[in-house]
Image (cartoon, rainbow, N blue to C red):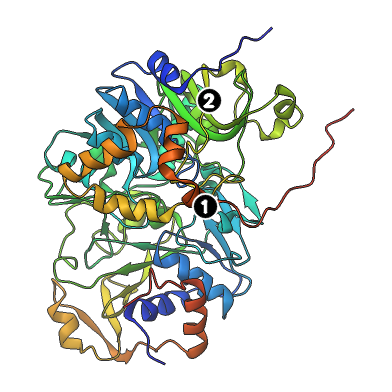
Amino acid sequence: MSYTLPELMVTAAAREVADGEVVFVGMRLPLLGFLLAKSTHAPEAVGIYELGIVRDTLAPEPILTMGDLPNLYRARWLADTADMMGLLQQGQVDVSFIGGAQIDRFGNLNTSYIGGAENVTTRLPGSGGACDLASLAQRHIIIMNHQKRRFVPQVDYITSPGYGTGTGWRRKVGLPRGGPTTVITTMGVLQFDPQSREMILVSVHPGISQETVQDNTGWPLQIAEELTQTPKPTENELAMLRRFDPQRYWTGP
Amino acid sequence: MPVSRLLPLSEAIDRFVPDGSSIALGLAQETLIPFAAGHELIRQKKRRLTLIGPISDILFDQIIGAGCVHKIRAAWVGNVITGSCYNFRRAVESGSLEMEDHSNLTLAMALRAGAMGVPFMPARTALGSDLFKTNTNLKTMTCPFSSDQLTAVAALRPDVAIVHLQRADIYGNAHAWGNLGLIRDACLASRHIIITAEEIVEPDVISRDPNRVITPGYRVNAVAHAPWGGHPSPVPGFYNRDHQGFIDYRTESKTQETFLDWRKRWVDSVHSWQDYTKLLGKKRMAQLALTHHDFSESVDYGY
């Protein structure tokens, strides 16, 4: 069965969720990642949405965004944003997913100002809850377009903190826990060196070479000793995704 | 006896939102966005407004495009299902809009501090981020008990909160249901409150279910009847999200010229909720109607 790049990425994201985990679900592709995880290997996962929604069952109909009424239907809890943020701040969120426009080798993300706040060339929407998820979840997964202008040596503005300048930085600035563990891009999957906290390429998507990934990265990229190929989505995973996104709004070619 | 606070939307906005006001709105994030009230700000050519909200799903962009806004204090300004918003981008990139960058948590804490009557709330978010560079209402502090590094979020007291919800009585007592976002904290923190409601109901309907009340009516300054006043955002119990409205707006706001056409059609030519629903059309409203009702059990508040 053929698949699209967004389908491969969502599948890779879904596989990062373990069964029974509490997931803070961000907007766009992460919405589908959570649904896919729940409908396959993580049926007991619990989803928290920043609007003030906790749910542990699939929405009864396809949704384009977390505020769609089927996502409120028979939720476990409908409450305040501060309630959701309280669970997050206490450390009760295992994993979250965020996207970014610009990223550096330590996983710091910019979704606010390209060019920096002083000389802004492109204003992006901002943090939303992303800064909070990057600061306070036990771990977070980043989903990104892999382009040289986005994978830069240093981001123009840190909206969502990664590992800052490397080892020990999060503790030094006072962040209580967490950090990015995986970056899923349009070209491959990257993780972070446990010592240096620098990004390492661990798998490339089918048809993508290590050299192509390097050419699209703005710094000399570390490569894992055993570089693998990102597993393709299974027939079951694709069937599920097409149920959740029948118009292919998020996962179309 | 309480006095009626029921006003036409135009009068509510005219009386309680002077130029230069700071306004909290869009507080439930993706649901219950007060589009009708926001469009009234545009029609009345309000100026030098400060808009406060967690994530804005295009309403901020519309008010910015109409030249009403001086400053934004928000976590995210865009179009949830399509990405960036063009009026917002044009305004920030040209330097005409002042920006105070929040996260959803810091904005929630700013309003909670206002609601609690304290000067700030501590948080553990955003440490090490550049939010501190573009938001002087965030400072780092040392916890007096644990010596942990914390983020102090200064209290925010908006001049007015504008809230769209399902039903209200004429005295300002109102029910909202669904996800509530920052609605309750913002109402407590704000000096004035304007409510727009899908339905105006008998006081009994509200008082028989006080747990669903979002803020006591005596603190509310105006109530306006605004059916479809949240469109294109979803209103639980009334209508679904109009995705096409958000998708179309992306194109309609791409340039200043196309935005002016959008504004003429959807704002300037509309003078009442009846005008708006006529423009929307029966067919589109039918498509957005709920198809699966799901009523909760009633509960006994008796003694």
Name the outermost residue toward the top: B1
- Dot 2 alpha-carbon crowd within 10 angstroms: few under 14, some 14 to 19, many 20 or more: many
**Amino acid type, mark 2:** Leu
Numbered disc in front, either 1 or 2: 1
Mark 1 falls on what kind of element? helix
Which of the 4 image quadrants contains residue A207?
A: bottom left
Q: Estimate the x, y position of residue B47 in percent, counting from the top left.
A: 25, 22
Residues A139 and B234: in front is B234
Residues A62 and A10: in front is A62
Is residue B236 visible in the rendered image? The answer is: yes
Q: Which residue is mark 1?
A: B288
Q: Estimate the x, y position of residue B125 in percent, counting from the top left.
A: 40, 47
- Label 1 chain ID: B
- On whether disc 1 and disc 2 are found on a single subunit, the reply is yes
Q: Which residue is mark 2?
A: B188
- Residue depicted at x 70% and y 34%: B211
